[in-house]
Image (cartoon, rainbow, N blue to C red):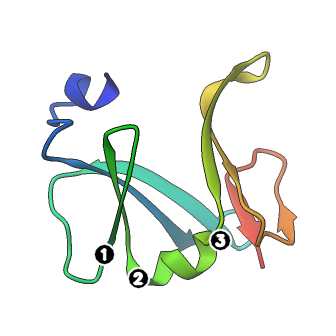
Amino acid sequence: MLMTDEGYNAITDFVRVGVKSGGCSGLSYELKFDKSQQETDRLFTDNDVKIVVDKKSVLYLAGTILEYSGGLNGKGFVFNNPNAQRTCGCGESFSL
């Protein structure tokens, strides 16, 4: 598992998903591993993976589906965000 390869414990640590300013469309997605959960984070669990999202990012990510794609365009995670009015060609940034 990727978490173990990076030195994280899949049982106690988290995948942190967030949104930050930047990218060619104005906002960009952030995806990383984290060992600490903040008091204002929302915790989700899917397939035994703990996912934390900070309070501000929850508003931008409501209804978003994060999928892993291994298609012809390369392997990686894809954000399917129903709130995005515009996305860039790489799929890593969006605007509302």
Disc 1 secondary structure class: loop
Residue 40 visible (yes or no): yes
Residue receiving disc 3: 27
Q: Residues within 10 Å of mark 1 (few under 14, many from 20)?
A: some
Give the amino acid type for the residue marked by disc 3 in the picture. Leu
Give the alpha-carbon distance from disc 2 to disc 3, as whole Å. 16 Å
74, 70: nearer the viewer: 70
Reply above or below: 52 against 39: above
- The residue sitting at 19% across, 67% down in the picture is 37
> Which mark is in front, 2 or 3?
2
Q: Residues within 10 Å of mark 3 (few under 14, many from 20)?
A: some
**Quarter of the C terminus within the rendering:** bottom right
- The residue sitting at 19% across, 81% down in the picture is 39
Residue receiving disc 1: 41
Among numbered discs 3 and 1, the one appearing first in the sequence: 3
Determine the image quadrant of residue 59: bottom right
Q: Position of residue 45 (x, y in %)?
A: 36, 52
Residue receiving disc 2: 55
| In contact (CB < 8 Å): disc 1 and disc 2 | yes
Residue 22 visible (yes or no): no
Taking 48 as reference, is 69 left or right? right
Q: Residues within 10 Å of mark 2 (few under 14, many from 20)?
A: some
Among numbered discs 1 and 2, the one appearing first in the sequence: 1
Determine the image quadrant of residue 64: bottom right
- The residue sitting at 28% across, 83% down in the picture is 40
